[in-house]
Amino acid sequence: MTQELAPTRPAPERGWWRDAVIYQVYVRSFADSDGDGIGDLRGIRERLPHVAALGADALWLTPFYASPQADGGYDVADYRTVDPLFGTLDDAAELINAAHDLGLRVIVDIVPNHTSDQHAWFRAALADRQGGPARDRYHFHPGRGDAGELPPNDWESVFGGPAWTRTPDGDWYLHLFAPQQPDLNWHSPEVHEEFESILRFWLGLGVDGFRVDVAHGMVKAEGLPDIGAREQAKMIGSQVLPFFDQDGVHDIHRSWRRLLDSYDGERVGVAEAWAPSPERLALYVRPDELHQAFNFQFLNCPWDAQAMRAVIQTSLAATALVGAPTTWVLSNHDVVRHLTRYGGGDETLGLRRARAAALLMLALPGSAYLYQGEELGLPEVTDLPDEVRQDPSFFRTDGQDGLRDGSRVPMPWSGDVPPYGFSPQGAAPSWLPQPEAWKSLTVEAQTGDPHSTLELYRSALALRRELPGLGDGPMTWEQPPGGYPDGLLMFSRPGFVCTLNTTPRPAGLPTPGRLLLASEAPAEDGAIVTLPADSCAWWAI
Ligand code: NOJ
């Protein structure tokens, strides 16, 4: 690596992650620099000013490592190499440095629960004999039934179908996700050593932390017991299962925390953990474990003030027990975009609610993750033709559950026709087609329009930086005089009040203060303010 690519460090700031706004870049769909219709690292570097101007503190990059792409790169064949689809290691180093120059930290994905079936270790395991040492890095077991013809237990893959695949010599191997993603055996010391070395490799290149994929899954219950009549695993589910949220995973996170702490600049770990309760989730962010854990209870909460209040309250209470901040999130590359979830088929309604939800989330204490495109008010693309879909769950469930490609459609940047600046002129079509209607949603179309969702996000993030009461710190639920009208929420932070109306009706309240920002303008009449239906407002007090 050349001298210019020596890693840079962002300005030190203690506890930066406690209230950071972190922007998720789905690498394949952010920006394509070389015209193959697939996003890449150089494309991201060129578009970094968008993330900086938005006001985010950091980026999280989804996996860009060498991979056959059986699960969008979450099937890693070599953890220290950049897939040629996305660029080179020098591109990665340049991207990290360019982000640092703009004051943005960089978090990369680490995928420790499983490798690709093309990883050198898995190839060696297949080539080894039954019971051989190369198989010990994975979960190989003989089957049940007279001739071992039945899987070792009844576990199902998160993507549908059995979680076991049989090899030609009769052994079965475990894959909680696709068959191309064999689960690693974290009882093997070699697995621990290898992942510590991979973490050091990327820390040496200057990354500021890791989003830990399936952080709740690396350790399986002793004896691999059957699930029986209980419900099988779902993407971002919260069931109690013998392969998720086992106590043993915390030893791994503790050892990774020690490793992270041995580097300068507060490098962080964020758990993608599906836990059955906020209390179980809080265990991942104890002071000697990871720094953050996505709050999927909040993501899964319906558009209802009382339900939201309950989730917010229990989340804050649970993380307070361990002294950690809460990490809010509304969308990511695995779920239907929140605009579409909240709108239930009505995009106008969905947009109103999505804008309000963003202001709610950004007013809460703690850190928040934004998923690329939510700042543009992008809806889920629900009418993708079957032949362009790539999500493995779509193919393993007869198309019943192929919901993830619709949130991964490439970003619209500019212009009136696809690829809307995603790729350079004359490029191959984008890997998923962009809808016609997105011409009014491009970054270019929304910039400077005070009513646009992009400008709402920019203003919210600017205020969040400016107002000392936002970000990390205390919050108090407020009772409007006469009690809450149904479907309303109101809370204060120092010098600040947030009001949320989740009902389809306008709601009157005594004016809480001076209006700072609103997802829909409230009508103020002297001391009374009318909050529009499905809206959120920020007030200075
Ligand atoms: C969670 C990732 O976000 C998802 O995209 C992936 O399919 C699974 N983990 C398996 O790695």
Image (cartoon, helix red, strand yellow):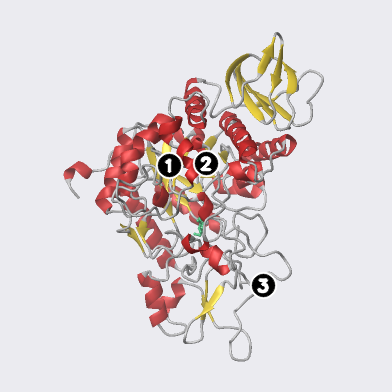
Label 1 element class:
loop
Could you tell me residue 128's position as x and y percent?
A: 40, 82
Is residue 233 positioned above or below 265 on the image?
A: below
Going by the picture, which residue comes out furthest to the right?
482
Q: Which is nearer the eye, 327 or 464?
A: 464
Judge from the rendering whether residue 253 lies leftward or rightward of residue 306; answer left or right. Answer: left
**Amino acid at the residue labelled 3:** Asp
Residue under circle 2?
A: 378
Query: Would the CB of label 1 be found within 8 Å of ligand 1?
Result: no
**Image point 36% across, 57% down: which residue?**
65
Name the quarter where the C terminus is drawn.
top right
Contact (Cβ within 8 Å) of mark 3 with mark 1? no
Contact (Cβ within 8 Å) of mark 1 with mark 2? yes
Could you tell me residue 243's position as x and y percent?
A: 60, 64
The crowding category of the residue bearing disc 2, from other C-alpha atoms within 10 Å (few below 14, some 14 to 19, many at least 20), is many
Q: Gap in Å between the C-alphas at discs 2 and 3? A: 41 Å
Residue under circle 1?
A: 412
Q: Which is nearer the eye, 250 or 138?
A: 138
**Circle on res. 362:** none
Label 3 element class:
loop
**Amino acid at the residue labelled 2:** Leu
Residue under circle 3?
A: 226
In the picture, residue 442 is in which quadrant? top left
